């Protein structure tokens, strides 16, 4: 019986797609509105899925060479619009930001629509809870006052990292893991006033990193269900399941700390010390707390560590830049960098800051941003972006655009010296943190912690590659948070 039914079961979705495809082609060709941006001719049903294989920034950059800086693809039933120039980025993230700053939530997110609106950064900018969590993060964590109150703790974590490395002189160190543990503890102290990982136990960050990367990979995988909605319920690739399992494991990391703090609070024996206290005082329940921390860790750790690691690699590949930076650190900061870390100094026009900017230009950790969605149909220059289109901005391609940058593939931090170009969302040729309503809320923290860690690693150590090790390289790995080849191993020698 089951065998007899099989052809009908297969035929039904096929007929449904042909019907949907015909309907949507008719609706675009009959309209009088300006045309869609150019793109390769879609096949029936599949659209352009066969043109892209993976939705990577590199593939989209290559396609844009043929179809232009505002391009349109049809992936299954979904319309995807990709901007690859600074002028179209400005149109999307500034001129039409109100309409285009909605989110296209990946179907791997294991939440219903109403859960997203109550719990998550994935919700839309007009939703109260989205405004509420962004405001809370801005005021408590990322304001000048919030950052100043964390400065001493940052110094402590970075000092621990340097001390650990002094004990490893001449030995091979997994720098990626070391930086991961340090950054994870910086964030966990800002949120919970405690370390979750240990440097000494051969780092102990591996398992947590697997959970975190698991969530990111599930979110960024090319998920067929997103483009052929009738398949959505089935989670064929197991991405929703993977996200859910990894999230539960992440939550178990801090759940005992939350329980303990609640009990302390109820007994009256407590004084406010960190972000967890703020959330508890504001009546956040455990589900809200878990989701918020999961999203803050997921968004903040990989991006920050990859920027630090890539800067170290670029500096090793460009010895002139390395020498210049070491000279600046020796003269400007001397031995004082760690004991009396002047964070205000770090954010000014120093070569260190220029190195970070140059890394972010060439290797933005989120090269396509996160997917935006058109809340309603709008016009961008002479083109139409239809309602519910999935909108991407290829900031990786924009950072390498030869009409904007001299010798764009060269690592030349000097281009940022005596230049007002910044990553705060006003310069549309340089958008590693995006711009507009969706601009990264963690920008003020990343802008300080990244140079602090790099400055310490470079001020206090010379670095060499192990003789038979993995050649530290910055080839673009084809995934959306373009992290690096693992393991990233180097040998430190202390500098006097
Ligand atoms: C070098 C470090 C970082 C880079 C380059 C970066 C970049 C980005 C980008 C490009 C987006 C997407 C914006 C869009 O879709 O238009 C984003 C979103 C986000 N980032 Fe960051 N980020 C970094 C660090 C952090 C840190 C340290 C945190 C928090 C501690 C953080 C929290 C977030 C959150 C919560 C979102 C989602 C915001 C929303 O959708 O409303 N990020 N980030």
Image (cartoon, rainbow, N blue to C red):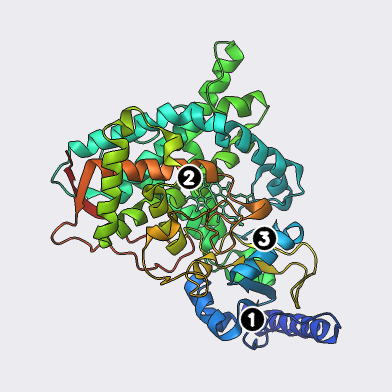
Measured in 3D between alpha carbons, the distance from the residue under mark 1 to the one under mark 2, in whole angstroms, is 57 Å
Give the mark nearest the N terminus, 3 or 1: 1
Image position of 130 (left or right of 301): right
Disc 2, SS? helix
Identify the residue under disc 2. Answer: 447
Residue at the spot of label 3: 93
Residue in the foreground of this view, choosing between 340 and 272: 340
Q: Position of residue 326 (x, y in %)?
A: 26, 47
Q: Nearer the viewer, mark 3 or mark 1?
A: 3
Neighbourhood count class around disc 3 (C-alpha, 10 Å): few under 14, some 14–19, many 20 upward: many
Picture quarter containing residue 137? top right
Marks 2 and 3, how far apart in space? Answer: 21 Å
**Disc 3 and disc 1: Cα gap in Å?**
47 Å
> Looking at the picture, how far across and down is residue 3, in whole percent?
61, 81
Pick the front one: 397 or 157: 397
Q: Which residue is mark 1?
A: 6
Measured from the top left, where is residue 475 in percent x and y?
A: 35, 68
Mark 1: is the Cβ under 8 angstroms from ligand 1?
no
Indicate yes or no: mark 3 CB to ligand 1 under 8 Å: yes
Query: Mark 3–mark 1 contact, CB under 8 Å?
Result: no
Sequence-wise, the earlier of marks 1 and 2 is: 1
For residue 7, which quarter of the picture? bottom right
């Amino acid at each position: 019986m089951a065998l007899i039914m099989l052809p009908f079961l297969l035929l039904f979705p096929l007929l449904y797609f042909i019907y949907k495809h015909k309907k949507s082609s008719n609706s675009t060709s009959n309209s009088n509105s300006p045309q869609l941006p150019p793109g390769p001719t879609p096949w029936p049903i599949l659209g352009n899925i066969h043109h892209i294989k993976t939705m990577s920034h590199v593939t989209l950059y290559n396609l844009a060479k043929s179809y232009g800086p505002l391009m349109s693809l049809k992936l299954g039933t979904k319309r995807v619009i990709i901007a690859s120039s600074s002028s179209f980025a400005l149109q999307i993230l500034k001129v039409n930001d109100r309409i285009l700053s909605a989110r296209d939530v990946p179907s791997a997110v294991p939440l219903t629509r109403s859960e997203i609106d109550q719990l998550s950064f994935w919700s839309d900018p007009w939703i109260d809870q989205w405004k509420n969590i962004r405001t809370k993060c801005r005021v408590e964590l990322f304001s000048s006052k919030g950052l100043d109150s964390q400065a001493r703790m940052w110094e402590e974590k970075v000092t621990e990292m340097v001390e650990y490395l002094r004990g490893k002189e001449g030995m091979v160190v997994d720098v990626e893991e070391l930086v991961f543990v340090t950054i994870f503890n910086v964030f966990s102290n800002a949120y919970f006033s405690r370390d979750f990982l240990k440097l000494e136990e051969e780092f102990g960050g591996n398992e947590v990193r697997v959970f975190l990367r698991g969530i990111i990979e599930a979110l960024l995988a090319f998920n067929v269900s997103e483009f052929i909605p009738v398949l959505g319920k089935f989670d064929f690739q197991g991405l929703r399941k993977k996200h859910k399992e990894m999230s539960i494991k992440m939550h178990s990391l801090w759940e005992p700390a939350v329980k303990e703090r609640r009990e302390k609070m109820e007994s009256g024996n407590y004084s406010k010390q960190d972000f967890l206290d703020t959330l508890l005082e504001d009546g956040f329940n455990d589900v809200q707390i878990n989701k918020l921390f999961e999203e803050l860790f997921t968004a903040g750790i990989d991006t920050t560590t990859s920027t630090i690691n890539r800067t170290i690699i670029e500096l090793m590949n460009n010895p002139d830049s390395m020498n210049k930076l070491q000279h600046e650190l020796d003269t400007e900061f001397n031995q004082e960098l760690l004991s009396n870390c002047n964070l205000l100094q770090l954010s000014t026009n120093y070569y260190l800051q220029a190195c970070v900017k140059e890394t972010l230009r060439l290797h933005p950790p989120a090269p396509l941003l996160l997917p935006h969605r058109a809340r309603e149909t709008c016009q961008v220059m002479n083109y139409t972006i239809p309602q519910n289109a999935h909108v991407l901005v290829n900031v990786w391609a924009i950072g390498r655009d030869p009409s904007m940058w001299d010798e764009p593939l060269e690592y030349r931090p000097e281009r940022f010296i005596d230049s007002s170009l910044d990553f705060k969302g006003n310069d549309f040729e340089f958008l590693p943190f995006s711009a507009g309503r969706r601009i990264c809320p963690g920008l003020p923290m990343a802008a300080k912690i990244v140079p602090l860690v790099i400055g310490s690693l470079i001020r206090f150590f010379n670095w060499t590659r192990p003789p038979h090790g993995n050649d530290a390289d910055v080839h673009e790995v084809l995934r959306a948070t373009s992290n690096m080849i693992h393991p990233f191993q180097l040998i430190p020698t202390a500098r006097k």
